[in-house]
């Protein structure tokens, strides 16, 4: 079959591979008016066996997500054919007949359809960003990784102050990179603090402090109302100097084809943790997909994890895509975010470590001892450990402070010192209680009479009672091994 | 042998009582003749137990050990002291001469000066007489109101609930027990007391108290304009040191009131000490009994050893809510104000436990426990020392 031959896109370098794949695939599709397909239409009912087995993979899109999936399928020795179709030539997905139609009238049957449609940068509706012809005005740049590394480089080479619009992960990263390059940087963000969609208030305020410490000015709770060359006006009336305005205002997933085919679409094409859409024959991955499990906008960067997971599933393994972890790329500002803000707030078990003096913070939102969401700031070892627990859905060990501080857990059960104060109101120590015991005070009332312990607010009564039973008992107990031994001897003597 | 000297103690409350006990115990040669004067109708009693007595079986078991060989004059107040002539004037006009004077006057409840604060049906909870008045005024099934969501306010609300009333608590701060708890702990506490039928209203100061047709309290309005029915109001809006004697005696006061004393409880005037809630130790007052006892012990040592003696040990401000059923405890540096302090917390649906640690991540500085305070006695002895075990082991609930 002609179409199968086109799939031998043994990809090498990423971008050139994308082009190769694009060329070979489109080249093949022109000639692919297929008798087979027509046959399928009559013989196969959707969802059951047709000539196209599930192993016959058609990928829509030719961006990095599509290339990653192709490479992963080849590497895992996927047995069936793999084809790529660039999004612009596709006009419709016919789910019932399991084929994709192209602008030239071609029809491409599939066993499995993988949507790797990508996303485009979101350009906010701020007056002055565009020329009358529609393209972005001089000085306005797109800072999301979608725009490619060149855009970021251009922003760092144009002289003068930079305003970064939007302090999500991309905007924060861009601001930090620009600052490291010695530029004057101001961040404008509508939320109460940077990364407000992901971070709770404590973490957000610490992050804002860390940015300020590096000389980045942060205007939180502010939106841009107008751009004129060199100047950005905010809604609170402030005017910022902006030789460059870097837009980090999010992305818009390409969902049109999926929506027109009747697939559920939120911000992106909705998929479950196995990257399945509502249609069992259609999966989606990368920046066009939205994991319903994270409930927090499009799935974040590590799209190669998704490619890897989807490829594994299509080659027979039952793999779920590891949930995405957002990290800053700055070498000295360690921030890792897992799960959605909602999961962070709603998980029943919340562990926090807050060290404002050192700018360190960790919050683990646990569900049945597993990480449902987490924020880890300024604790690189904890970030690595927690990320692994999260991605592998393993239970968090019991020594959680040690985990977060990256220190070895302590051995439990150190002996109590005689100097420990048991009754705070009357300042009675463990040693004094033991002495009183030795002098014959053998219950709470007698110990109270002898030492005044328990006669203040009374909250140490249980502790004193436990001490009594430990000293009467043959061994062990809170009195410590040595004292329990003595207690036991006295017990026998009585 | 030197002639007997006269020690006068103004106020026979919890710390005055402790001072006399300590002096008596240490004074083997009986050099001190001791007199205490209190304006209350009875000698010292266990003030801490007032809330449980209010809720439970009445004031039967409130008494403290009576002092042998000391004279307590009840129902008498000291109106002036003169450091130069070493005399004290009583409200009956008589004078007492002293060689040493210890001020242990405690504090008085602060009643915010809102309209209607002195209507019949408005109470404070500080003394045995207050307790009797509240017990007599409580009406089962009717709404009551406590002004102040601190330690005392919540205990008072718990007592009202035991007396069958439906208590509401009004608190100015955004969460309950703002002195002791952080936001997370206070938020959880609100849910827990709410489940007991005590309704907290936080972030809204009391605006006014209103009378009903009979002239008694019938309701209140809050600053936001909201109104609540209330047939009994207890003010527990904080305390103020009773330092009125300072002015005429020219004794300096702390910035927030209280007799200003050094770290040995000495006022500026030789032979005059102050202890307990009325003392501003280096400017700071303490509203709990443990620091007051440390002060009493320090002064007793100075009086019996005729030496300066060691200064006060670090004062413990651990507090534990005794309100039945809801466990709340806070100890040490609960708000993590020590520079470099680290907070480690675990919150679940019904519990909140926080440890405050030094920057080394090991030395315990303080903590907050809400919903389950069973670890409190285990934790407080560890204050200012390196943790002997993993915090999660120490925080784990103690069974039984
Ligand atoms: C209901 C309640 C519950 C409490 N629970 C706790 C608790 O759980 N834990 C805790 O640590 N603390 C608790 N406290 C606080 C504790 O009771 C006080 O810290 C302690 O009583 C202070 O002792 P004091 O001697 O300084 O003052 P007080 O005990 O108030 O004694 C002062 C005495 O001096 C008298 N006096 C004042 N001026 C004069 C004068 N001019 N002439 C004559 N007499 C005078 C007063 O009438 C009073 O009798 C509670 C308090 C209350 C009211
Ligand atoms: C760690 C610690 C530190 C302490 N520090 C101090 C201190 O610095 N100074 C001090 O005096 N005592 C201090 N104390 C003592 C203690 O907080 C109380 O003063 C004492 O126990 C009496 O309890 P309370 O509930 O009356 O007072 P508080 O704990 O002061 O509670 C009174 C509450 O009433 C609220 N309130 C006041 N006015 C209104 C109003 N009009 N409407 C509604 N609510 C109102 C206040 O916001 C407050 O929460 C401290 C105790 C601890 C444990």
Image (spheres, coloured by chain):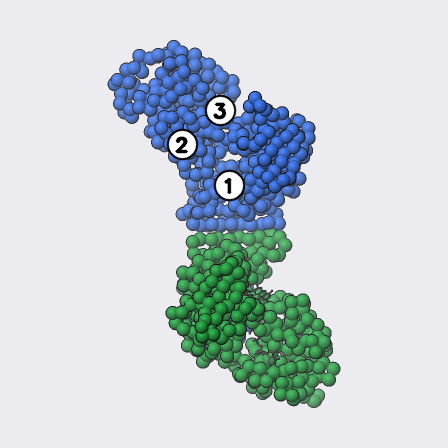
Tell me if residue A443 comes above or below residue A388 in the rendering.
below
Residue neighbourhood size for the residue with mark 1, other residues' Cα within 10 Å, grouped as few (<14), some (14–19), many (≥20): many
Q: Which chain is blue?
A: A
Image position, residue B249 (x, y; %): 70, 78
Q: Which mark is residue B1?
A: none
Q: Residue at x 43, y 14 (%)?
A: A26
Q: Residue at x 41, y 38 (%)?
A: A293
Find the distance from the CA under tag 1 to the CA under tag 3: 25 Å
Tell me if residue B205 comes above or below residue B308 in the rendering.
above
Please report whichever mark, 1 or 3, sits nearer to the chain's N-terminal start.
3
Q: Which mark is residue A265?
A: 2
Residue neighbourhood size for the residue with mark 2, other residues' Cα within 10 Å, grouped as few (<14), some (14–19), many (≥20): some
Q: Which chain is green?
A: B
Please report whichever mark, 2 or 1, sits nearer to the chain's N-terminal start.
1
| Residue position marked by numbered label 3 in the rendering | A64
Residue A186 seen: yes
């Amino acid at each position: 079959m002609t179409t199968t031959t086109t799939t031998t896109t043994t990809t090498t370098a990423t971008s050139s591979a994308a082009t190769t794949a694009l060329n070979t695939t489109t080249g093949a599709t022109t000639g692919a008016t297929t008798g087979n397909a027509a046959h399928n239409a009559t013989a196969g009912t959707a969802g059951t066996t047709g000539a196209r087995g599930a192993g016959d993979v058609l990928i829509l899109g030719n961006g990095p997500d599509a290339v990653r999936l192709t490479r992963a399928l080849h590497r895992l020795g996927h047995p069936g054919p793999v084809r790529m179709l660039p999004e612009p030539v596709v006009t419709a997905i016919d789910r019932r007949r399991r084929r994709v139609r192209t602008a030239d009238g071609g029809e491409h049957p599939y066993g499995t359809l993988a949507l790797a449609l990508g996303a485009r940068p979101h350009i906010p509706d701020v007056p002055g960003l565009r020329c009358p012809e529609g393209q972005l005005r001089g000085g306005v740049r797109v800072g999301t990784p979608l725009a490619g590394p060149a855009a970021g480089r251009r922003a760092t080479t144009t002289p003068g102050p930079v305003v970064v619009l939007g302090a999500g992960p991309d905007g924060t990263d861009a601001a930090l990179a620009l600052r490291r390059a010695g530029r004057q940087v101001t961040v404008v963000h509508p939320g109460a603090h940077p990364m407000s969609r992901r971070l709770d208030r404590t973490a957000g305020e610490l992050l804002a402090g860390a940015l300020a410490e590096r000389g980045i000015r942060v205007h939180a709770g502010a939106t841009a109302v107008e751009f004129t060359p060199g100047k950005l006006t905010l809604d609170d009336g402030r005017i910022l100097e902006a030789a460059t305005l870097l837009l980090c205002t999010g992305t818009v997933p390409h969902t049109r084809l999926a929506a027109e085919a009747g697939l559920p679409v939120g911000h992106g094409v909705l998929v479950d943790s196995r990257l399945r859409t509502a249609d069992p024959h259609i999966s989606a991955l990368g920046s066009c997909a939205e994991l319903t499990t994270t409930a927090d906008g499009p799935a974040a960067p590590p799209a190669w994890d998704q490619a890897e997971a989807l490829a594994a599933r299509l080659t027979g393994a039952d793999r779920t895509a590891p949930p995405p972890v957002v990290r800053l790329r700055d070498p000295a500002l360690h921030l890792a975010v897992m799960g959605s803000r909602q999961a962070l707030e709603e998980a029943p078990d919340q562990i926090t470590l807050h060290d404002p003096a050192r700018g360190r913070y960790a919050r683990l939102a646990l569900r049945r001892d597993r990480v449902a969401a987490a924020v880890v700031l300024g604790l690189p070892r904890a970030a690595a450990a927690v990320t692994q627990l999260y991605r592998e859905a393993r239970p968090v060990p019991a020594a959680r402070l040690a985990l977060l501080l990256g220190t070895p857990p302590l051995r439990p059960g150190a002996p109590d010192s005689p100097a420990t104060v048991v009754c705070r109101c009357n300042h009675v120590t463990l040693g004094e209680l033991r002495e009183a015991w030795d002098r014959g005070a053998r219950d709470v009332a007698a110990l109270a009479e002898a030492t005044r312990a328990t006669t203040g607010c009374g909250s140490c009564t249980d502790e004193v009672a436990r001490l009594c039973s430990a000293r009467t008992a043959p061994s062990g107990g809170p009195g410590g091994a040595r004292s329990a031994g003595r207690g036991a001897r006295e017990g026998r003597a009585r | 042998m030197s002639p007997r000297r006269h020690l006068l103690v103004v106020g026979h409350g919890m710390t005055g009582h402790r001072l006399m006990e300590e002096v008596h115990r240490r004074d083997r040669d009986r050099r001190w003749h001791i007199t205490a004067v209190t304006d209350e109708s009875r000698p010292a009693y266990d003030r801490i137990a007032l809330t449980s007595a209010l809720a439970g079986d009445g004031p039967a078991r409130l008494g403290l050990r009576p002092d042998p060989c000391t004279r307590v004059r009840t129902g008498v107040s000291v109106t002036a002291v003169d450091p130069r002539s070493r005399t004290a004037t009583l409200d009956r006009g008589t004078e007492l001469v002293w060689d040493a004077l210890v001020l242990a006057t405690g504090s008085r409840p602060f009643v915010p000066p809102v309209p209607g604060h002195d209507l019949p049906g408005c109470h404070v909870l500080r003394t045995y007489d207050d307790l009797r008045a509240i017990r007599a005024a409580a009406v089962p099934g009717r709404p009551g109101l406590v002004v102040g969501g601190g330690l005392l306010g919540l205990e008072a609300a718990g007592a009202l609930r035991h007396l069958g009333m439906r208590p509401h608590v009004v608190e100015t701060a955004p969460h309950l027990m703002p002195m002791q708890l952080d936001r997370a702990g206070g938020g959880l506490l609100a849910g827990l007391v709410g489940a007991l039928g005590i309704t907290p209203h936080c972030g809204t100061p009391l605006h006014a108290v209103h009378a009903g047709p009979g002239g008694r309290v019938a309701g209140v309005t809050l600053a936001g304009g909201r109104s609540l029915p209330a047939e009994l109001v207890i003010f527990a809006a904080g305390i103020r040191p009773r330092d009125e004697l300072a002015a005429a005696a020219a004794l300096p006061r702390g910035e927030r009131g209280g007799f200003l004393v050094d770290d040995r409880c000495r006022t500026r005037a030789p032979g005059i000490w102050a202890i307990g809630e009325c003392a501003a130790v280096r400017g700071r007052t303490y509203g709990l009994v443990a620091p007051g006892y440390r002060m009493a012990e320090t002064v007793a040592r100075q009086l019996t050893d005729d030496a300066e003696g060691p200064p006060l040990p670090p004062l413990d401000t651990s507090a534990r809510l005794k309100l039945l059923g809801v466990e709340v405890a806070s100890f040490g540096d609960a708000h993590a104000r020590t520079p470099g302090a680290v907070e480690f917390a675990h919150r679940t649906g019904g519990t909140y436990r926080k440890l405050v640690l030094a920057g080394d991540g090991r030395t315990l500085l303080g903590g907050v426990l809400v919903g389950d305070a069973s670890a409190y006695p285990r934790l407080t002895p560890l204050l200012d020392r390196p943790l002997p075990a993993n915090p999660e082991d120490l925080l784990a609930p103690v069974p039984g």
